[in-house]
Image (cartoon, rainbow, N blue to C red):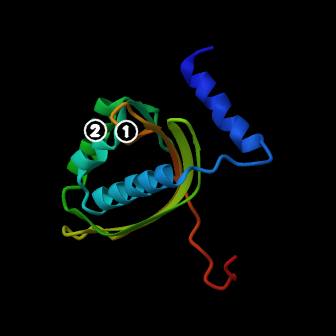
Amino acid sequence: MNRLASVFLILCAGAWSAESVTPNVTARTEIDSFNQALTEATRHMDNAAIVALWDDGGVSLLPSTKPIVGKKAIAKFMEDVTTQLPSGRMEKFDMQCFDIETSGNWASEWCQEHQIVVFTDGKPTFEGRGNMLLVLHRGVDGKWRLQREMWNQALVPNPSSSSE
């Protein structure tokens, strides 16, 4: 069985068990710091800082897009998007993550994001929301990095519904 299949089974086993794998305080603090770094880099549209948060063999799975495999391909994808939208400026980016689970040097969490991008060339403002599933790996240097990301569009919250 290959390493990725083993990791998948470990993560699934944690999800299927009656008890979830709760991260220790140190891992939780480190992952919260990772999430803050990702949020700040995205707010500033800092592609280099975002790419630095990816593992070399990371994979990004986006809707209607072929899998983007490897840090170099992820960097190129981000640069292409930035080049195609040169007048875009992130006005707002918020991300909240939930249900962090760890197993050794692996972690998973799901997040919700909301972004508003304004354009100085007259293009209409973009407002988007997304749901993300993130799989993180802690490297030999102790830093958590993105190993897998899956994103899909989220619904706009209904203001008349009560919150849970």
From this viewpoint, is residue 84 visible?
Answer: yes
Q: Which of 59/64 is in front?
A: 59
Indicate the quadrant where residue 93 lies. Answer: bottom left
Check whether the beta carbons of the residues at disc 2 and disc 1 lie within 8 A of each other. Answer: no
Q: Secondary structure at mark 1?
A: loop
What's the mark number on residue 115?
A: none
Tell me the crowding category of disc 1: few under 14, some 14 to 19, or many 20 or more residues within 10 angstroms, Cα based.
Answer: few
- For the C terminus, the image quarter is bottom right
Disc with the residue nearer the chain's start (2 vs 1): 2
Image coords of residue 41 (percent x, y): 28, 56
Residue at x 25% of width, y 48% of height: 49
Q: Secondary structure at mark 2?
A: helix
What's the mark number on residue 142?
A: 1
Q: Which residue is mark 2?
A: 75
Given the image, on which type of amino acid does mark 1 rest?
A: Gly
Residue at x 58% of width, y 16% of height: 2
55 left or right of 87?
right
From this viewpoint, is residue 60 visible?
Answer: no
Given the image, on which type of amino acid does mark 2 rest?
A: Ala
